[in-house]
Amino acid sequence: MRDERINERYEIIKPIGGGGMADVYLAHDIILDRKVAVKVLKSQFSRDDEFIRRFRREAQAATSLSHPNVVNIYDVGEEKDLYYIVMEYVEGLTLKDYINQRGKINVHEAVAFMEQIASAVSHAHENHIIHRDLKPHNILISQDGQAKVTDFGIARAISEATITHTNSVLGSVHYLSPEQARGGNVTYQSDIYSLGIVMYEMLMGEVPFQGDTAVSVAIKHLQTPLPLLKERDPSLLQSVENVVLKATAKDPSVRFLSADELLEDLHTVFSSYRASEKRFELPQPSEDATKAMPVIKDEQVDDENKTFIHDQKTKVSNEPKNDPPKKKKKGVKYWLIAIILSILFLFGALYVAFALIPSWLHVDDVTIPDDLVGIEAEEAAEQLRELNLEVEEEWRYDDEIEEGLVLSHNPRAGATVKEGTRITLYVSEGVEPKEMTDVVGHSLERAERELEEFEDIEIEFRETSDYDDDTVLSQSPDAGDLIIPHETVVTLVVSERPTYIMDNLSGMTRDEVANTIGSNALLDLNFEDEHHPTIEEGKVISQDPQRGTEIRERTDVTVVFSLGPEPEEEPEEEPISVNVPFRVELDGNDNGDETFRVQISVMDMMNSEPRMIIDRDIRETERFELPMTVAPGESGYLLLYINEEQYEASPYEYTYEELKQYQ
């Protein structure tokens, strides 16, 4: 059917499995754009009204189931004599393939799988459906480790507690319950037997009963005790073996009463109070228990792992094949003595039966008290022992009932039982511990969401620059510790980036500033200086950032110190122009008879080269006024020549400061 399309919706991709009645294909649902599994009735059965009826019944039964561990049914249809069911596609392995790959499964994983499978079967039983063909081939393990039960192909919706078959028993021989092999009534306990065999195979890596033919395997289910698991694996907990032993009891009444009871037992197999549990002892079967087993012929079996069909019309003959040798006739005397002895024996037996035995066997009836639930287990046990009843305690976790109080009991309150009856008290072990969640490395917000079931969470902050703000650095209790949430105080150590509130540095000296903030790892100090008219030299004028600023990252801090007031500036001086008095004295010419030629030149800021100012003859000492312009910080010069020879004292220098006196 590859590349075909069913109902213009389901495009067949490839075959992925099948059984004796139908083939299974991987298909693509075009409308919902998803992968689905399509189970199609085989063509040779499409005209067989009985098979079609059974096929439709499978769909109707399965569609009533809605459970995370049951393969969902999406659609049922018929097209051109093609009968099909569209189911959830589970990507993964069958449990059979899973076991074949691993040899055997770790006990914790096996119990976890069985809890899921038992939960699915319990849901089916609540909907009055018996699977009747439970085996690893019909259990899928998804890639995320979830177990899903499929193929309710031979399940029947029922409204009563049992199903009676008139013609055949269907099942897989290695997982067949004794009552199915015998052709008797099939009840919910039949599924429980198959679950026990599946659990055995998970733990041991193989089925408990092997044989050359399917018939020989079926007979072992009827007659042979289940091999003890602990003899093959002494490390296995007795509580785990007891689950398998009780589930696979030959007598259905000895097995778990329901899948729920099996599930409850699985929940507690690793509990500490079951560590010293004794082996579950099965009652010894009577000698006649299997004498009426119908004959099962090899030709009635398709395959050991497929359908085992038993025709109950097969007759069982207990007649011997050869006639026994004739016996010698006995005489009258012999028969007379035998009759007399028989009469005496009969009268004796009647006397014993009606007079003595009732008094010997009489056991008083007692009523189970109705006030046991909610009281201390010891008190409840004492009340029951006072009624001459035996007491057995089974402890279970409970989120609401306090530890040590009775949750329920079996038989229930008001039931009438015989003295000596064993009463089971189900006692609260308190809230089931759970593993502490790992929140280290998470943000505080995320950690609080993940720990919302905890009532008391304490938070401690620790400064560090290595992590972002509000990162969980450590936790108590540690991840993986077993705790009870509402009784546990959780402490989280959370990162906090270092924070510094900027000090007021105003008026401090350099040393004081260095002592105050110089060692802070968040701050890089920078000093600057400037004049200030009022702040004393060496004291802080200003700072950046300002005081009170919250600093969380590495920051440059600039501090400005005072150099004191700025010095007063003297007024800027201008160049000056003055008349410089200059006296020329003539020595040795007292009578004035001799004439001297006098030449005077000036060099100043106006005359970079000497400029002649005076050039004349004189007979006596004279005083001259010579103009000169000089800039601040500079000098002017007078050059004197007498009779065209430079006077030995010339030139005469006049500084700016000296000339200021002539202003």
Image (spheres, helix red, strand yellow):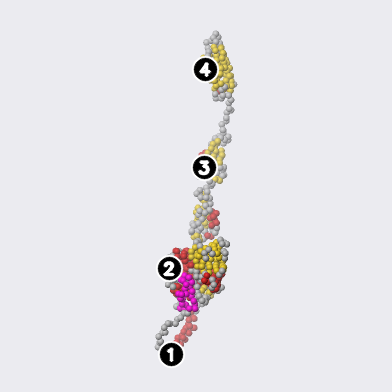
- Amino acid tagged 1: Leu
Q: Earlier in the sequence, mark 1 or mark 3?
A: 1
The residue located at (48%, 70%) in the rendering is 306
Q: Earlier in the sequence, mark 4 or mark 2?
A: 2
State how far apart marks 3 and 2 are (Cα): 73 Å
Q: Considering the numbered disc 3 on the image, is that residue within a helix, a strand or a loop?
A: strand
Q: Quadrant of residue 549?
A: top right
Q: Are marks 3 and 4 in contact (CB under 8 Å)?
A: no
Q: Nearer the viewer, mark 3 or mark 4?
A: 4
Q: Nearer the viewer, residue 366 or 613?
A: 613
Determine the main secondary structure of the stretch shown in magenta. loop
Which residue is disc 1 drawn over? 336
The residue located at (43%, 68%) in the rendering is 230
Which residue is disc 3 drawn over? 524
Q: Is residue 294 magenta?
A: yes
The residue located at (53%, 50%) in the rendering is 469
- Amino acid tagged 4: Ser
State how far apart marks 3 and 4 are (Cα): 67 Å
Q: Nearer the viewer, mark 4 or mark 1?
A: 4
Q: Answer few, some or many: residues within 10 Å of disc 4's Cα (few below 14, many 20 plus, some between 14 and 19).
A: few
Tell me where residue 585 appears, x and y as whole percent. Answer: 54, 13
State how far apart marks 1 and 3 are (Cα): 130 Å
Q: Which mark is residue 650?
A: 4
Which residue is disc 2 drawn over? 230
**Which residues make up the magenta segment?**
291-314
Report if residue 393 is visible in the image.
Answer: no
Q: Considering the numbered disc 4 on the image, is that residue within a helix, a strand or a loop?
A: loop
Q: Nearer the viewer, residue 512 or 295?
A: 295
